[in-house]
Structure formats: structure tokens, C-alpha cells
Amino acid sequence: MAERKAPKRRRAGGRAGNLRGKGPAVTQLPWSLPINPDRPTEPLDEDGVAAVHDGAMRVLEEIGIEFLHPEALEILAEAGCKVTGENVRMERNFVMQQVALAPDSFTITPRTPERRIEIGGKRMIFGNVSSPPNCSDLDRGRRAGDRESFRDLIKLTQYFNCIHFAGGYPVEPTDIHPSIRHLDCLHDKLVLTDKVVHAYSLGKERVEDVMEMVRIAGGLTWQEFEATPRMYTNINSTSPLKHDHPMLDGAMRLARRRQPTVVTPFTLAGAMAPVTLAGAVAQSMAEGLAAIVLLQVISPGCPVAYGTFTSNVDMKSGAPAFGTPEYMRATQISGQMARFYGLPLRASNACAANYPDAQAAWESAFSLWSAISAGVNMLYHAAGWLEGGLCASYEKFVMDCETLQQMIVYMRPVGTSEADIAVEAIKEVGPGGHFFGCAHTQERYETAFYSPFLSDWSNFESWEEAGAVQTPERANRLWKKILAEFEAPPLDAAIAEELDAFVTRRKQEGGAPTDF
């Protein structure tokens, strides 16, 4: 699954949504699981890491975390934790023993095994924007999410090789009733993509239904499903210091089936966490480790990851801010702490911009860079995020994929062979010459450098003559071409029929209970 050398400016990667006859909509890199070869940036020294760790342990020992789930409270009490009402306090030695059981890396295998992903180590994988209630594009403007837009964004998720997993809903399809939304959405995901999918931990029925649908789509027995990770969930704490019932319940159900959970506290410094970065990260670690301990008690060795979502707020308005200097440092510090505990790390490619403009580009670039420099393994919301997560943008999705491709190329190892050092080519050209025509260049020029699919490198006069088209408009043209030419990846007819039958039956049964 290591990255392969790209062919001469042709789209590669097989199942990215086949294109018919007209050539690829985008010249993209082949499917690969990037490896980040660089040493992580580590803002804290050894004493600093120890201080944050001690702070997290003191929160767990002296203050405790609320678990709003009766069974979770019983399990933790039996394991030796001090439970008072819904408050749980844990001794640090117990915490470290349980966290040590979690693997430092794991794989997830979707219905197409070639789309297997690895989370941990030096790997870095990217997922689509997840969970915004709204979406936007330049033609229709900003609007509430619907199933058509959901399907569009799932198709973009499938198409781009730099997107490795299909996270939460890329936009909430509000035209589908909440009781059956998970059935239609997961059906669309499993038909339109062959990448790893996610289940929202929002009640027993949703989680159990999604596990069954993933099992069916993979043509698996339950024994095969439980033998290795096939899907995952992400849960968020209700910061400060609380885990609610639906999130815990879903994570516990997946743990019993040996499926992974990413535990991501939502700690905004100055609002739901201390205003200091070290304090915010310490609280985040305490919240995350508490849930990880629960899952290890239930299913020792079950795969888990710690997710950082520590940023700051605008202290004038209280609005979340992303891609800030504080966000970058908090992500890097979280990377140090995740390595200290031996856990894979998740972060996000977030921005607060309201339009796919320069602000969106620089905030996302800073978020992406913080993830790379922190040694993040799993990047949520890697493509399409706007408005602090309230909107999924078609154009931003394409723009982000351009940036992701560039970072994937950036992470490629630098060769130092005799041919790479190129002393003979330097000798051939000599003083005052140029390298355009030398054999060394001629043999390599087509693949030597990354060629962007979205940037415009023409001079001003040519750009102006061609209509002065700016980046969002170019992205607009590309997503339309991708969707017009998209074909879903193959799915066995018998499996498709079984999946349809399950969705139909569960709809007839009412799906998941709701308040309306």
C-alpha cells in the first residue's frame, strides 16, 4: 500500500469513479497511503510533556469525568474506579495500564480490500468534510443540506484518490427524516464509495444498523466482521469533563465488535477549556483518556485513536477560530501527548471562513500544516469545510484536494542516489549553461515536479484574455465535470440486493426512534 510513482500525467488509482471517453476531469495522483517522513515539531520539552501529563492525571484523579451511561458507570466501578453518582475518578496507574493495552496502529478494511487504510505510525490519511448542516456552491449559493447534495459530495469523496475514508455525512440531508436518515445515507455511501465508512454514535439502532450494512456490503459473516476492523466511529466529549449517553453507547457497541473508536474532545480554549494552551490540552487528554480506558476495560486491545480538536475562540464574540497560531501549537502539543501515550492521533483541516476565498485557503493551509508537523495520522474534514463546520462547499472540496495532493508529494522521500545528486549532469552542463536540454533533465522532466490541476500558472495577459477566472470558479468547473462523468465502483448484484432488502425492512420497522 506504499505510494507508487505516478505515471506521465495520467489519472491513476483505478476505482476513483470511472471517466468515459473525454479524459480525466482531474490529473490526480494514484491511490496511496502517504507516509510522513519528517520529525514532528515538538513545542514542549520533556518537562513540559510531563507537566501536561500530570495535569491530565490530576483531573482524572481529583476532579473526575462524568459518564452519563449507567452501564459504563457499572463497568468502571467494577474495574476499581471511584464512582460517585455520574462522576468517575481514576487512579493514574490504572489509566496508564489500560491505555497501554490499545494498539499504536491498526488497519480498517472496507468492502474493497484495496482501499484498506492504516491508522498510526508514520501514516497520514485524509477524510472528507463531515456533519455540516448546510452546503454551498457558486451556482446555488448556501442552502440546507439535502440528499442530492449529500450524494454529490460522496461522489467527490470517492473520486479523489487523496481522500482515503468517507467520514460522517459530508452534509446532513435534512430532507430525509432522522429516523431513517442513517439507512439512506449509509446505503448511498456503500453503493457510491468503496472506501472506509463511519457510523454516528447516536443511539443503539443507528449503530447496530450501520454495522449490519457494512457487514452485508463486505459479503462478510459476523465472525469475519469482528476479526478485523471494517468501519469506525468518532465520539466527542461534552466539554468540559462529560461524556454523554449516545456517544458512549455507540462506542461501547463497536468495542464489543472490535471496531475502532476515535475519541475527540471538543475543547475550545477560553470557552470549554482553560484559556491557556497547556491547560486546554491537559483537559482534552483527560477527557479522551477516560473514554479510552472504558473501551479497553470492555474490550482489551480494541483499536482506538485520540482526536485533538483544541483551538481557541474569538474572545470578543465567543465564535470558534481555526487555523490560528494557537490551533497549530495545540495540535503539535497534542501530537507529543499522543506519542507519549502510544496512541494514533486524529486532527482536522478546519477554517472559520464563510467563502472559499483567501482566508479559507490560509486557515486551512495552516490547519493542514499543523497536522503534518504534529505527526497526525488521521485528518478529518480534509476537504470541503467552511464556516467553522457549518457548511460544506463544493468548490472548497476541490481546492482542498489540490492542497492535499501537494502535501502528499511534499511528503515523498528525497532520493540521494548518484543519479539524484547528478554530478555527471552538472559536469555536462558546466559553467554558464542550462539544464533544459541535458540528458538528465530529458529523462525526468515529465515526472520531476508536481503539476497542479487547479492552479493557473499563465502570465497575467494570458489569464486576463482567458476571462480572468479565479480559483473558486475554476474549482466550480471541475466538480461539475467530475459529477457529470462519475460512475460508482462495482458492487456484486447479490450483495446490492441484500443491502436494499435490509434498508427496506428497517424502514418498515421504523428505523431509529426520534422525538418527532
Image (cartoon, helix red, strand yellow):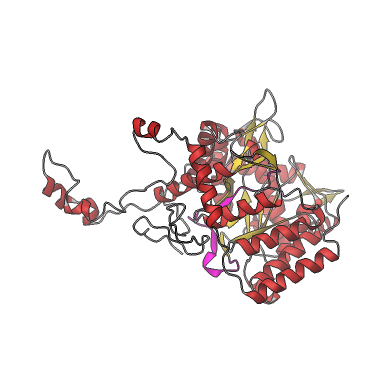
| 129 magenta-colored | yes
Q: Quadrant of residue 261?
A: bottom right
| 267 magenta-colored | no
**Residue 205 position (above or below residue 176):** below
Give how far across and how far down residue 474 sits, in percent. Answer: 48, 41
Give how far across and how far down residue 279 sits, in percent. Answer: 64, 35
149 vs 209, left or right, is left
Name the residue at the top extreme: 316
What is the span of residues highlighted in magenta in the rendered image?
Answer: 109-133
Give the residue at x 30% y 51%. 448
Give how far across and how far down residue 151 sits, in percent. Answer: 65, 54
Q: Is residue 299 visible?
A: yes
410 vs 280, left or right, is left
**Residue 186 position (above or below residue 410):** below
Q: Is residue 343 visible?
A: no
Give how far across and how far down residue 77 sits, in percent. Answer: 81, 57
Give the residue at x 77% y 59%. 206
Which of 264 and 63 lies nearest the eye of the viewer? 264
Give the residue at x 43% y 34%. 467
Give the residue at x 50% y 62%. 18
443 vs 26, left or right, is left
How many numbered marks are there?
0
Which of 416 and 150 lies nearest the eye of the viewer? 150
Which of 365 and 460 lies nearest the eye of the viewer? 460
